[in-house]
Image (cartoon, rainbow, N blue to C red):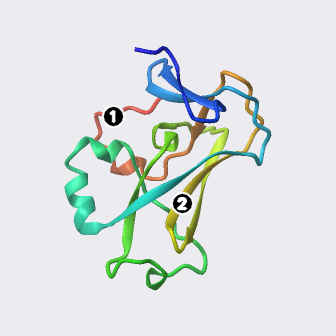
Amino acid sequence: MADKIFDRSNTIYVKNSPRKGRGVFANVPFKAGEVIERAPTWGFDDVAAKLLDRTGILEYYFVRPDQPGESPADQPSESPLVGYVVFGFISIVNHSSNPNAQTVWAYGNSGAWATIVAIKDIQVDEEITHRYSNISAYPKNIKFVD
């Protein structure tokens, strides 16, 4: 198996991160404010969340914080969406209490999109991290490492 798996643009890659498992790393420097990756999502409601929470997908889905001015009526489902599976490397960006990136959400006719944006300068080969907003939902046996 390859030691590093690159995205199509070769700007980021995936490799094992000490004590964390897989992580996403910079292959080029990113300045604060630059987009690292943008990915489409699949949103799901509370009924689906209860099923997904019983699987390993819990560790990979996102809980989107409420956006000012966005109401459940703006969402495509009759039931409010409570979580998102993000398609792309963003889904395996590791948590940090002192992150160098953040997830920014956008919603349009093509659905919700997640964008990971640098909030600090990131050097080549530095791990890209963001703050998980749903840590309390994880099983107690999962320990988060900074």
Residue 105 point in image, percent of width and height = 58, 61
Residue sticking out furthest to the front: 8
Q: Which mark is residue 126?
A: none
Q: Secondary structure at mark 1?
A: loop
Q: Quadrant of residue 129?
A: top right
* Rendered view: 102 above or below 105: above
Q: Amino acid at mark 2?
A: Trp
Residue sticking out furthest to the bottom: 73
Q: In this figure, what is the number of numbered marks?
A: 2
Q: Amino acid at mark 1?
A: Ile
Q: Quadrant of the C terminus?
A: top right
Name the residue carrying label 2.
113
Q: Secondary structure at mark 2?
A: strand
Is residue 77 visible from the viewing direction of this image? yes
Q: Quadrant of the N terminus?
A: top left
Residue 14 point in image, percent of width and height = 51, 27
Residue 112 point in image, percent of width and height = 50, 65
Q: Which mark is residue 142?
A: 1
Q: Residues within 10 Å of mark 2 (few under 14, many from 20)?
A: many
* Rendered view: 54 above or below 78: above
Q: Residue at x 50, y 39 (%)?
A: 89
Residue 84 point in image, percent of width and height = 41, 58
Q: Nearer the viewer, mark 1 or mark 2?
A: 2
First in sequence: mark 1 vs mark 2: 2
Q: Residue at x 35, y 42 (%)?
A: 59
Is residue 146 visible from the viewing direction of this image? no
Q: Residue at x 38, y 32 (%)?
A: 143
Instruction: Tell whether 45 sits left or right of 123.
Output: left
Label 1 to label 2, Cα distance in Å? Answer: 27 Å
